[in-house]
Image (cartoon, rainbow, N blue to C red):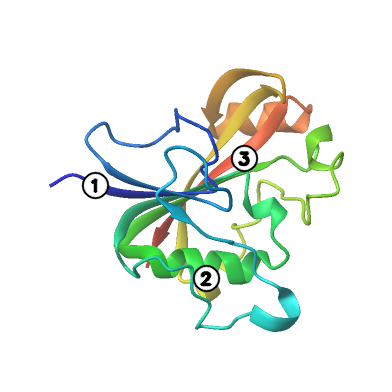
Amino acid sequence: MPSKVCILGAGDKLDVRDVPPDAKVTRVDIRPLPGIDVVANLQILPQIDSYNPHVQWNLPEEAFDIVIAEHIVEHVWDRIAFLVACRRLLAPNGTLIVEVPSWKAQVAHNTLEHKSTWGRAIFDDGYITPMLKLKLRKVEFRVGWEWYVFGYTRGFWGRMLDRVGLVSAYRFHLRRI
């Protein structure tokens, strides 16, 4: 049976990592662009929606094997409420893939649209992931700059390249528990 994948903030991206070739893909964006299946505002307002279990994106709950949010979470006001809403979309044992700019990258700071910055250890502690009922499976490091990407790496070399400022983004793979 083909995987069901939901791409949040899909925009006009045609090639997205980690989408199986035979997957049934649902593309979501705030703009009604060609190829978008669901037009929805994914912004969660902190004073109104924070931790609200009833925030609705007009997407079915527990329906997707993979939910991908590439370079969108740093734009929302309440990232924890956003991640909780993403988790609700995941089927049991589903995977949430979140890619965000490295806090060291200039792109993380040079736009007023970014509401938060992210470090590579954000999901390592014992507080956030148990609260979200997500388990960190792996972190990939995007090596390069905002205008050129060499590729992705993991583990020791990813951490070393991050320390010297050559990582432009983090890609977190989280499993629903």
Mark 3 lies on residue: 170
Kindly indicate the quadrant of the structure image that contains residue 145: top right
- Vertical placement of residue 29 versus 63, above or below: above
- Residue 84 is tagged as 2
Dot 1: element: loop
Residue type, numbered disc 1? Ser
Of tags 3 and 2, the one toward the viewer is 2
Q: Earlier in the sequence, mark 1 or mark 2?
A: 1
Dot 3: element: strand
- Residue 3 is tagged as 1
75 with respect to 1 (left or right): right
**Whole-percent x and y of residue 86?**
48, 63
Residue type, numbered disc 3? Tyr
Of tags 3 and 1, the one toward the viewer is 1
Q: Which residue is pictured at 59% across the width and 58% down the height? A: 123
Q: Which residue is pictured at 81% across the width and 37% down the height? A: 104
Residue type, numbered disc 2? Val
Q: Earlier in the sequence, mark 3 or mark 2?
A: 2
Q: Which residue is pictured at 48% across the width and 68% down the height? A: 57
Q: CA distance from mark 3 to mark 1?
A: 24 Å
Kindly indicate the quadrant of the structure image that contains residue 171: top right
